[in-house]
Amino acid sequence: MPQDIERLVKASKEALSFSRPVYSGFRVGAAVIAHDGRLFTGCNLENASLTLSVCAERVALMKALSEGATGLRAIAITCASGKTCYPCGSCRQLLFEYAPEIKIVLPSRSSIKVLDLKELLPMPFIKK
């Protein structure tokens, strides 16, 4: 996993350059890795109608899923400020739906945290 973490962090930082935070100014990049080693990146894209904006994590996840990736192992989330950038509640729930065992990689200027999704979403909505 250490090599994967390096690849993920690098890819998430590169994805920042495509971010379109035209209203918030908060740039985020994400990268997800599948069991087969494929990487998928995403960035946040904002719209005047706030509900049409999308988070970097969701873009990366949807790209992976729409290209047939299964068994998503980890996702890195990077923000331009260099601070730790946790996924929002909506992204946590979406990740749980499609990759409940995924590791969340959170780089900052001073460290890299690796968490289980269950630590960030202890009580997810579950389809019954």
Image (cartoon, rainbow, N blue to C red):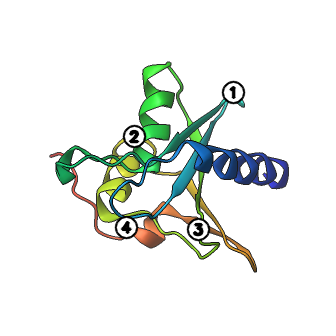
Label 3 vs 2, first from the N-terminus = 2
Q: What residue is shown with label 3?
A: 115
Type of the residue with mark 2: Tyr
Label 3 vs 4, first from the N-terminus = 3
Type of the residue with mark 3: Leu
C-alpha separation, residue under disc 3 versus residue under disc 4 = 11 Å
Q: Residue at x 29, y 57 (%)?
A: 90
Q: Is residue 29 left or right of residue 55?
A: right
Label 2 vs 4, first from the N-terminus = 2
Classify mark 2: helix, strand or loop. Answer: helix
In the current view of this chain or complex, which residue is farthest to the front?
Answer: 22
Q: What residue is shown with label 2?
A: 98
Q: Do the residues bearing badges 2 and 1 touch, measured as CB atoms within 8 Å?
A: no
Label 1 vs 4, first from the N-terminus = 1
Q: Residue at x 54, y 25 (%)?
A: 69
In the current view of this chain or complex, which residue is farthest to the bottom?
Answer: 110
Label 2 vs 1, first from the N-terminus = 1
